[in-house]
Image: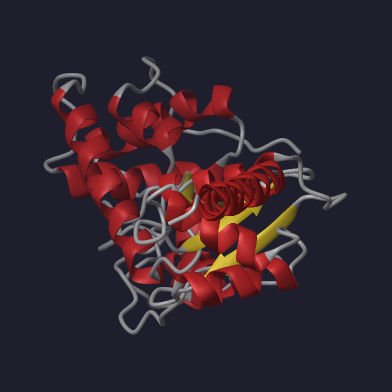
């Protein structure tokens, strides 16, 4: 092999290395430079998508500008098999490197659903059925008073029944803790009794500062064997929580024969009439001391 041939081979290999280095340098610059998208983009990636499908979807959404660079960069970084699925939000200008990092770490969008205090279980279930991002139907309606009202975080694709289970577990945990710290000699035999009375207090007043007083009145009535005479229980007996009555109560309503008519029946109704919140539960287990047997709702 002549010296000229060796020199040619050396220069050829050097040229290849320079070109390869240039391509790698260009690719790295493309992979790490800020993206061109002007707005935040949200993309849902489903389980089972491969790197090629992910890159195509990201390019179609405008998150990445070059599918090949993204795929090569992800493979070169050793991330291609560990990319997560779910709903992801990519801020404007996110580089392809940062896109891969978000997918690798599984930084999914956190969605929220808020369940207000004092809703019946039927209405809670309707909220979940209308909440976008959740999937699956709710075939069995939970019992009244078993769901804790609060704001719950979830990810796109979570099951609706899973949110219900979390709400039920939260109610069990909170009521058990409150029951342990309750005041002595309350006319409430069980946690369920406390939840039933809290559900009535919840519907009687929406003002936090009034709940302990209203609870105290009902506690005093229970101690004396008096009927609670609560309008919300009568309403629940007529609607069973399907929605508002839509009109003022009439005298005939107070004479209706339902198990929830506390004008006609003594003691607590057989079940809660709504899902009470923390303030109502606390008020029932720590009612305002006094001898009041009546209260008047003003406004």
Identity of the residue drawn at 54% across and 77% down = 53
Identity of the residue drawn at 39% across and 28% down = 283
Which quadrant of the view contains residue 281? Answer: top left
Residue sitting farthest toward the right:
38
Q: Is residue 92 left or right of residue 243?
A: right
Total marks shown come to: 0
Which quadrant of the view contains residue 237? Answer: bottom left
Percent from the top left, x then y, of residue 280? 43, 35
Residue 101 visible in image: yes
Percent from the top left, x then y, of residue 214? 47, 32
Which quadrant of the view contains residue 278? Answer: top left
Q: How is the model colour-coded?
A: secondary structure
Identity of the residue drawn at 64% across and 45% down = 18
Residue sitting farthest toward the front:
2
State which quarter of the image contains the N terminus. Answer: bottom left
- The answer to whether residue 256 is above or below residue 220 is below
Percent from the top left, x then y, of residue 32? 66, 40
Q: 280 or 261: which is nearer to us?
A: 280
Identity of the residue drawn at 68% across and 46% down = 22
Q: Is residue 199 left or right of residue 171?
A: right
- The answer to whether residue 114 is above or below residue 263 is above
Residue 250 visible in image: no
Q: Is residue 261 left or right of residue 6?
A: left
Percent from the top left, x then y, of residue 19? 66, 51
């Amino acid at each position: 092999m002549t010296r000229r041939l060796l020199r040619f081979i050396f220069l050829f290999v050097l040229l290849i290395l320079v070109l390869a280095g240039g391509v790698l340098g260009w690719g790295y610059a493309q992979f790490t430079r800020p993206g061109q998208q002007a707005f935040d983009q949200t993309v849902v990636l489903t389980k089972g998508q491969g790197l090629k499908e992910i890159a195509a979807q990201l390019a179609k959404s405008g998150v990445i500008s070059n599918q090949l660079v993204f795929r090569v960069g992800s493979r070169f970084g050793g991330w291609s098999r560990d990319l997560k699925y779910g709903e992801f939000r990519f801020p404007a200008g996110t580089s392809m490197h940062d896109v891969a990092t978000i997918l690798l770490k599984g930084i999914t969008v956190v969605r929220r659903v808020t369940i207000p205090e004092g809703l019946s279980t039927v209405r809670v279930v309707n909220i979940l059925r209308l909440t976008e991002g959740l999937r699956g139907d709710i075939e069995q309606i939970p019992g009244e008073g078993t769901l804790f009202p609060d704001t719950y975080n979830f990810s796109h694709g979570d099951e609706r029944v899973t949110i219900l289970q979390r709400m039920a577990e939260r109610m069990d945990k909170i009521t058990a803790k409150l029951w342990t710290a309750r005041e002595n000699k309350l006319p409430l035999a069980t946690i369920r009794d406390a939840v039933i009375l809290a559900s009535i207090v919840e519907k009687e007043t929406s003002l936090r500062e009034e709940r302990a007083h209203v609870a105290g009145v009902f506690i005093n009535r229970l101690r004396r064997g008096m009927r609670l005479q609560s309008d919300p229980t009568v309403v629940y007996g007529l609607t069973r929580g399907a929605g508002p009555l839509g009109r003022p109560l009439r005298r005939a309503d107070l004479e209706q024969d339902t198990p929830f008519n506390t004008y006609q029946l003594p003691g607590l109704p057989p079940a809660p009439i709504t899902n009470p919140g923390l303030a109502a539960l606390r008020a029932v287990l720590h009612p305002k001391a006094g001898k009041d047997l009546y209260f008047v709702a003003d406004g």
